[in-house]
Amino acid sequence: MGYGDLPLLSKLRPAVAKHARYVITENLRVLEKGGAGRQAELIAQSHISQRDDFECSILEIDALVDSSGRHGIRAARLCGGGFGGTIIALLPSDQVIAWWKFIAKENPEANLISTYAVNEAESEHAA
């Protein structure tokens, strides 16, 4: 099934069609190729589809993705099973510290699961 087949989903109940659209478009996104810019777009599309079609995001996760966008990071999305959890954001290593400070300021309840990227960025910055 390709993007051109999505109109066929209109034959399904609306809630089922939305969920099916997420599954189909997510599978298609995974198969797409392209440079970093295209991959960032696909990651952003994935989050929007998780939020709107599969309806598995929550306000706190959306806030983290939105904060990343305000910081200039397009490649951020819900990660995991949804209904809570985490985001993944892809960004240049020289922006990691500034990004995290921005996220933490806008979202004081946010926590880093892994400090690896921040620690690596700090070591590169100190060198």
Image (tube, rainbow, N blue to C red):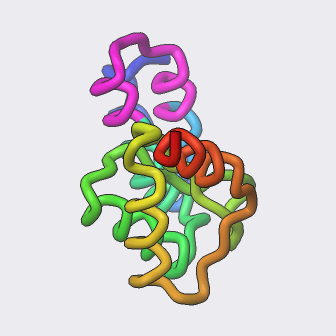
Provide the residue span drawn in magenta. Answer: 25-42
Position in image of residue 65 (x %, y %): 43, 63
Secondary structure mainly formed by the magenta segment: helix
Is residue 11 among what the camera can see? no
Q: Quadrant of residue 40?
A: top left
Q: Quadrant of residue 39?
A: top left
- For the residue pair 59 and 89, the one nearer the viewer reads as 89
Q: Residue furthest top?
A: 33
Q: How many marks?
A: 0
Position in image of residue 16 (x %, y %): 57, 53
Q: Is residue 79 above or below residue 42?
A: below
Q: Is residue 58 above or below residue 13?
A: below
Within the magenta stretch, is there residue 26? yes
Position in image of residue 75 (x %, y %): 40, 43
Position in image of residue 7 (x %, y %): 33, 34
Q: Residue furthest bottom?
A: 108
| Residue plotted at (41% across, 11% down) | 33
Drawn side of residue 87 relative to residue 46, left or right? right
| Residue plotted at (49% across, 17% down) | 1
Q: Quadrant of residue 86?
A: bottom right
Q: Is residue 37 above or below residue 2?
A: below
- For the residue pair 96 and 113, the one nearer the viewer reads as 96
Q: Is residue 66 above or below residue 4?
A: below
| Residue plotted at (38% across, 61% down) | 98
Within the magenta stretch, is there residue 16? no
| Residue plotted at (40% across, 54% down) | 48
Is residue 35 among what the camera can see? yes
